[in-house]
Image: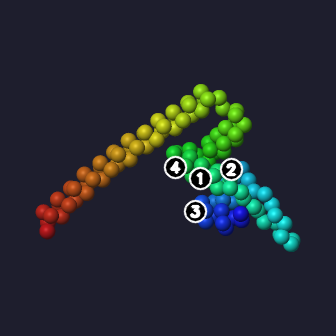
Amino acid sequence: MLIGELSKKTNLSKDTIRFYEKMGLITAGGQQAGSRIYKQYDATTVERLFLINKAKGLGFTLKEIKQLIDQWENDAIPPGEQIRIIECKLEEVAKKIQNLSEIKSYLAAKLRRLKQEADAVG
């Protein structure tokens, strides 16, 4: 499939797809059409892009994702190390959840105070 179709299937912009390709997160084949060469992407690229988005959502950086994809595909990370990586990321996510919960509590309290002050004035 061409980049436009890939963009629609993954809800990613063409620029994002090109950036991921430049970083080596995905690859494309070439198809000659006259004097132009069009990049072709296969179904595994769609799966890879979904994986990248999930990993980003879990807090992995693109650099970490690239490293993990490369190493996992080459079976270069032993299972124990894979477990350690995931456990560390889970700890980071738990800390982010805690921070967001604290922000939510602060904002809710602030909103209550502002509403009380508005009711007292009104």
N-term mark: 3 or 1: 3
Tags 3 and 1 touching, CB below 8 Å? no
State the image coordinates of residue 104 (x, y, percent, origin top left): 33, 50
Q: Nearer the viewer, mark 2 or mark 1?
A: 1
In the rendered image, which residue does mark 3 sit on?
11
What's the distance in space between the residues labelled 4 and 1, CA to CA?
A: 11 Å
Judging depth in this view, the residue of 98 and 13 nearest the camera is 13
| Labelled disc at residue 25 | 2
Judging depth in this view, the residue of 24 and 28 nearest the camera is 28
Residue visible at 55% across and 30% down in the picture = 84
Give the quadrant of the N terminus.
bottom right
N-term mark: 3 or 2: 3
Give the quadrant of the C terminus.
bottom left
Q: In the rendered structure, which amino acid carries the disc numbered 2? A: Leu
What's the distance in space between the residues labelled 2 and 1, CA to CA?
A: 12 Å
Q: In the rendered structure, which amino acid carries the disc numbered 4? A: Gly
In the rendered image, which residue does mark 4 sit on?
57
State the image coordinates of residue 118 (x, y, percent, origin top left): 18, 64
Q: In the rendered structure, which amino acid carries the disc numbered 3? A: Asn
N-term mark: 2 or 1: 2
In the rendered image, which residue does mark 1 sit on?
50
**Mark 1 neighbour density, 10 Å: few (under 14) some (14–19) many (20 or more):** some
| Labelled disc at residue 8 | none
Residue visible at 25% across and 51% down in the picture = 109
Query: Quadrant of residue 110 in the image?
Result: bottom left
Please, is residue 68 above or below residue 39 in the view?
A: above
